[in-house]
Image: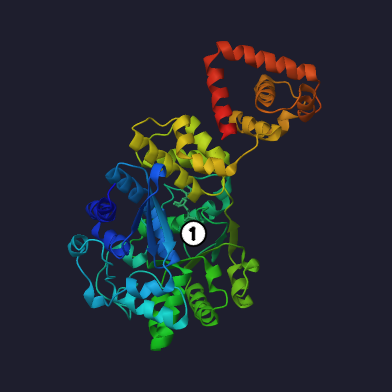
Amino acid sequence: MSADGLTALWQQGCERLAAELPEQQFNTWIRPLPPAEVADSGAQGLVVSLRVPNRFKLDWIRNQYAGRIESILSELAGRPTRLELALAPREALARMAPPANQAASVGQVLHNGLRPVPVNSPSHTASVEQASVVGMQSPQGPAIIIPGGANAQGPAPSSTRHRINPALTFDTLVPGRANQMARTAALHVAGAPGQMYNPLFIYGGVGLGKTHLIHAVGNALLKDKPDARVLYLHAEQFISDVVKNYQRKTFDELKAKYHSLDLLLIDDVQFFAGKDRTQEEFFNAFEALLAKRAHIIMTSDTYPKGLVDIDERLTSRFDAGLTVAIEPPELEMRVAILIKKAEAEQAPMPEDVAFFIAKNVRANVRELEGALRKVLAYSRFSHKEINIQLAREALKDLLSIQNRQISVENIQKTVADFYKIKVADMYSKKRPASIARPRQIAMYLAKELTQKSLPEIGELFGGRDHTTVLHAVRKIGGERQKNTELNQQLHVLEQTLKG
Ligand SMILES: Nc1ncnc2c1ncn2[C@@H]1O[C@H](COP(=O)(O)OP(=O)(O)OP(=O)(O)O)[C@@H](O)[C@H]1O
């Protein structure tokens, strides 16, 4: 692709997004982005690098739009195109946020090509300045509008007012063991806010669905009570609001904003660490909201007592309602998530492919989504159907990084997962066919895929004799020739184990 073609790609992508997305969403999230850099990395395809002013926006764009942006750009370029999002260095922020009165219309922005795009929100510009004064990251997006409140600015679409993402609902959240407690508690709060489990504190590692869950509560409540005063915000937004009001000495405005809510959803409260003034204001808001039986849901990367540099009077209050964890999803849940997300993209995913991806991408749901996006994009460009071979090609970087050695333990675990039996049954003396057969399959694969001898394999299967292993290897090997279903299952297992 020519240099001009590369330069035009982002602009064309924006035009497509402008046509596709609701105007409000486009204006809020896409339009203010600075021009992207597009690089050709040869056989690997194109890499589009975007600098985003803060982590909140970065996460939001990654979660909500990255997949679509990659698909559009790849389609336009006719080659796989990867989107890389990174935080803009601080000195670039000022350039990214020219004065509000330079705001341009969507059409202007698009026709002006790749020049830096102005941010059309006065509050955004003001906040950027404030953030640089106090050495913080820049804050996020448009002002919160409370109807009739101190900063009322006229009607606004509800998604702006509440900052709730309508796509993140209980329906789109796949349930599983990993989120069972948190989901149940969240459903309870959505049905009867201000009663039990107040505050609800949800913690867990990155990309496990905490943000999704709290948006789901917001969406559910708004569906029931459209007039409810609900607000979602990232902790950094609260911090920047405190800074702004501190500088303007407008604490009444801050109070009017936060103390009047029915439901406050606040993400990543670990960001309050070391911010004394913010903690004090949050404490005030917290007390005021609980006193009037408004509900507060918080998320964090750790449980309340694990938070550092946050005043104990806050952490003890965080723990006073219900504290629940979200765990990394287990294999079955990862498969279900992949299938559901692929369905949502109108790209049905065969279960064996979902199993292959889920087995290889374990860290968190965000990475799972990334892997899925790659596979779908790869299938679209190559016009090939989605199968394990295609998934393996699409994910080859990721798989080679893992550089996995096939071990007997891994075979036992994978086969047990596949046939939905316990790993312990691989070593047990149980004989029912539903257990004995997967065990024989695992022995067969151990012989095929590792350098272990028959006695060594027998030892690893609960101290069995080598003749038992030999029998299993011959039996499964022989049946494989005649039984296509077994052959297909073995194929999936081999592909999965080889990675
Ligand atoms: N159980 C689930 N079902 C469907 N999608 C999920 C599930 N869990 C997470 N996701 C999706 O994974 C992505 C990451 O989730 P989310 O942003 O909620 O994670 P998080 O725990 O808030 O992470 P972080 O701490 O990094 O902000 C989102 O796109 C979300 O929709």
Residue 378 figure quarter: top left
Question: Which residue is painted at 40% across and 75% down in the image?
Answer: 91
Could you tell me if residue 439 is visible in this image? yes
* 379, 417: nearer the viewer: 379
Describe residue 240's horizontal placement relative to residue 410 as left or right: left
Describe residue 152's horizontal placement relative to residue 446 as left or right: left
Q: Quadrant of the C terminus?
A: top right
User: Residue 135 at what x, y percent from top left?
Assistant: 47, 79
> Which element carries disc 1, helix, strand or loop?
helix
Kind of residue indicated by mark 1: Val
Could you tell me if residue 191 is visible in this image? no
Figure disc tally:
1
Asked whether mark 1 and ligand 1 are closer than 8 Å, the reply comes as no
User: Residue 164 at what x, y percent from top left?
Assistant: 38, 61
Vertical comparison of 112 with 133: above or below: above
Q: Which residue is mark 1?
A: 189
Q: Residue furthest bottom?
A: 249
User: Residue 433 at what x, y percent from top left?
Assistant: 67, 19
